Amino acid sequence: MSKIYIEEKIFEKKDFSGVELIKADYENCTFINCIFLNADLADMNFSECEFRDCDLSMAKITKVAFKEVRFKACKLLGLHFGNCSDFLFSVYFETCILNLSSFYKRSLKKTNFKNCSLIEVDFTESDLSSSVFENCDLSGAIFENTILEKADFRTSYNFSIDPELNRIKRAKFTISGLAGLLNKYNIEIEI
């Protein structure tokens, strides 16, 4: 059976939670106001695609290839990005809700998270080297054995990162963010 390729197509206001998206390689496609709630996207390839105002909550993304994929104003609750294909994995998130998602052991070098809600997201054993968290809420996010070298947290808030359990060399924080690095000591900091 030959592989199906879909290029430069715009999908708008489609509901793929009830009707399955065609198993294919999608290249330079745009998905606008589409619903993928609990959809099965396993083994699909998305290359240089953009998802805008879409709901991908609880979608099955096992072995999905996200290559230079942009998510803007999307709802991505409970996704397990650690199950995605490693090959050329590259994503960008802007104004997205990623609460309860997992990036367990995922390489996310130089990934941008802009104006995102990352509540209780699992970054355990991820590589976030040189990533930027711009104005993100990281309440309850898990950082354990995570590589955060040169990561930028200067405008983000509500994070709790243990410097003894993570590699944070040359990571960027503001003075107001220091409390998030000292939470385990149960001390009060006045600024």
Image (cartoon, helix red, strand yellow):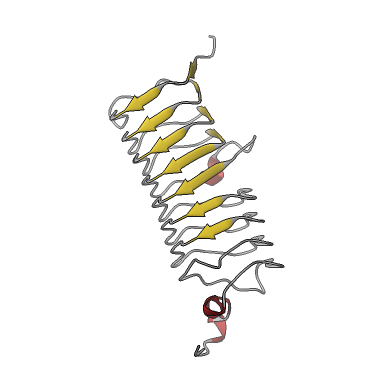
Count of all numbered marks drawn on residues in the image: 0
Q: Can residue 103 be seen in this view?
A: no
In the image, 130 versus 182, the foreground residue is 130
In the image, 149 versus 106, the foreground residue is 149
Q: Is residue 165 left or right of residue 51?
A: right
Q: Is residue 122 left or right of residue 76?
A: right
Q: Is residue 75 left or right of residue 158?
A: left
Q: Which residue is drawn at 52% across and 79% down?
A: 176
- Residue 135, image x and y in percent? 46, 62
- Residue 84, image x and y in percent? 55, 39
Query: What is the residue that sits farthest to the top in this orientation?
Result: 1
> Up-down: is 152 above or below 17?
below
Q: Is residue 142 visible?
A: yes
Q: In this view, does 153 lie to the left or right of 115?
A: right
> Up-down: is 173 above or below 34?
below
> Up-down: is 186 above or below 6?
below
> Up-down: is 171 above or below 185?
above
- Residue 91, image x and y in percent? 54, 42
- Residue 83, image x and y in percent? 54, 41
Q: Residue at x 43, y 56 (%)?
A: 116
